[in-house]
Amino acid sequence: MTHSKCILIAAAIVLLGSGAAKADCTLSPFAFFPDRNDRVEVTEVTDDKSFCDNSFREGPGYRFTDVSVVEAPPHGLIATLGPHHFAYHSMPNYRGSDQYSIRACATVGERKGCSTLIYNVTVR
């Protein structure tokens, strides 16, 4: 792990632990159903100073069995804040495109499945 990533992770822990981090990002509308679709693309726009906070809420009858990072962003980091909750932050002073993937698995009734959510990020 590079020195700058270690510093960014430490800063993320301090900010997230203190409650000072607030998401200042926009996400395109999206819907995913782990038992019905296996790939969903999401557009995310943020700046290089903000944490983009994301959490998955269980819908009627849905119970998550696993939510995990599949592909980390090459120009940022993902902080896991809980079993269905994470935040993206770009590397310091980075502006441009980034991408990461989250895999969410769930059951609904007797059906089960997984969706990969691919986040296409623009950092301004």
Image (cartoon, rainbow, N blue to C red):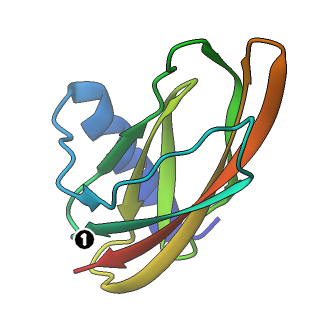
Badge 1: residue crowd in 10 Å (few <14, some 14–19, many ≥20): some
Q: Quadrant of residue 122?
A: bottom left
Name the residue: 20% across, 64% down.
49
Q: Which residue lies furthest to the bottom in this view?
A: 96
Q: What element carries label 1?
A: loop
Q: Nearer the viewer, residue 15 or 52?
A: 52
Q: Where is residue 73 in the image (x, y as percent from the top left)?
A: 56, 68
Q: Nearer the viewer, residue 35 or 3?
A: 35
Q: In which quarter of the image is the C terminus?
A: bottom left
Name the residue: 57% across, 44% down.
32
Q: Position of residue 6 (x, y in %)?
A: 50, 57
Q: Is residue 55 left or right of residue 67?
A: left
Q: Position of residue 8 (x, y in %)?
A: 40, 58
Q: Is residue 88 left or right of residue 111?
A: left
Name the residue: 76% across, 40% down.
114
Q: Position of residue 86 (x, y in %)?
A: 46, 39
User: Callout 1, which amino acid?
Assistant: Asp
Q: Quadrant of residue 43?
A: bottom left
Q: Quadrant of residue 62?
A: top right
Q: In which quarter of the image is the N terminus?
A: bottom right
Determine whether 75 is above or below 7 in the image: below
Q: Mark 1 points at which residue?
A: 48
Q: Nearer the viewer, residue 20 or 88?
A: 88
Q: Is residue 61 left or right of residue 25?
A: right
